[in-house]
Amino acid sequence: DPDNLRRFCMRKRQDAPSHAGGNGHHPPSHDGSHHPRHHFHMNLLEWCEIPSGDVDASSVAYGGESLGDKTVFVDTFYMGKYPVTIGQFNQFLHADDGYCKQDWWNFSTYAKQWFDNPEKEIGSKFVGDDRPYEMVNWYEAMAFCNWLSYKLNMKIILPKIEQWQRAVRGDNM
């Protein structure tokens, strides 16, 4: 229930120690170590390497506008093998340093405003920790990526449209 979540987050924020100086903790940039912090573990967190290559951008549209007949090169990247599961997102929801920590929402003014005044519907229609989590908006997906970046000590982002195209089509343009 959205009101319960709002009250829960407010209590967690009031109980959290404040940071001295600066503007709070931010997820670190990737330092090349690939070592998770504090022996962090998340079930079904597996990565697939997507090799570099060209993407036919004529099928890519931004805001309804096509890029025209153009080929775009996409560098090698890694993508999650599975959609984010109920169990994974629940780890974020219930972690002391997770969903309720305002630092993960500082990527935009709109995200901060949404976090402070949410109209949230938390939950999934699916049952079982290995099922996909749904009912997540862009702000929550970005906050999850920021938190996971911190936990894994590596940069996690949502894939760009060209990366999606490359992952789906490969060399079959």
Image (cartoon, rainbow, N blue to C red):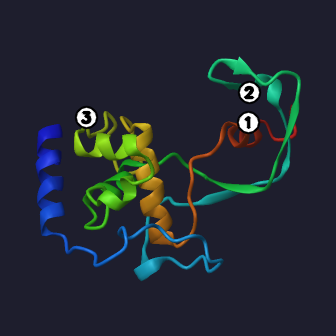
**Dot 2, crowdedness within 10 Å: few (<14), some or many (≥20)?**
some
- Left or right of 121 in this view: 106: right
Among numbered discs 1 and 2, the one appearing first in the sequence:
2
Residue 165 disc label? 1
Amino acid type at circle 3 is: Glu
- Left or right of 41 in this view: 155: right
Q: Tell me if label 1 and label 3 are in contact, CB under 8 Å.
A: no
**Rendered residue at 22%/39% (across/down):** 117
Q: In what element is the residue under mark 3? A: loop
Mark 1 to mark 2 CA distance (whole Å): 8 Å
Mark 1 to mark 3 CA distance (whole Å): 30 Å
Q: Residue furthest top?
A: 64
Quarter of the picture containing the C terminus is: top right
Residue 60 disc label? 2
Q: Nearer the viewer, mark 1 or mark 2?
A: 2
Q: Nearer the viewer, residue 86 or 157?
A: 157
Among numbered discs 3 and 2, the one appearing first in the sequence:
2
**Rendered residue at 14%/54% (across/down):** 10
In the picture of the structure, the residue carrying the numbered disc 3 is 121
Q: Tell me if label 1 and label 2 are in contact, CB under 8 Å.
A: yes
Amino acid type at circle 1 is: Gln
How many numbered marks have been drawn onto this rendered protein structure? 3
In the rendered image of this protein, does residue 106 appear above or below residue 162?
below
Amino acid type at circle 2 is: Val
Q: x and y percent of residue 163 in the render? A: 71, 43
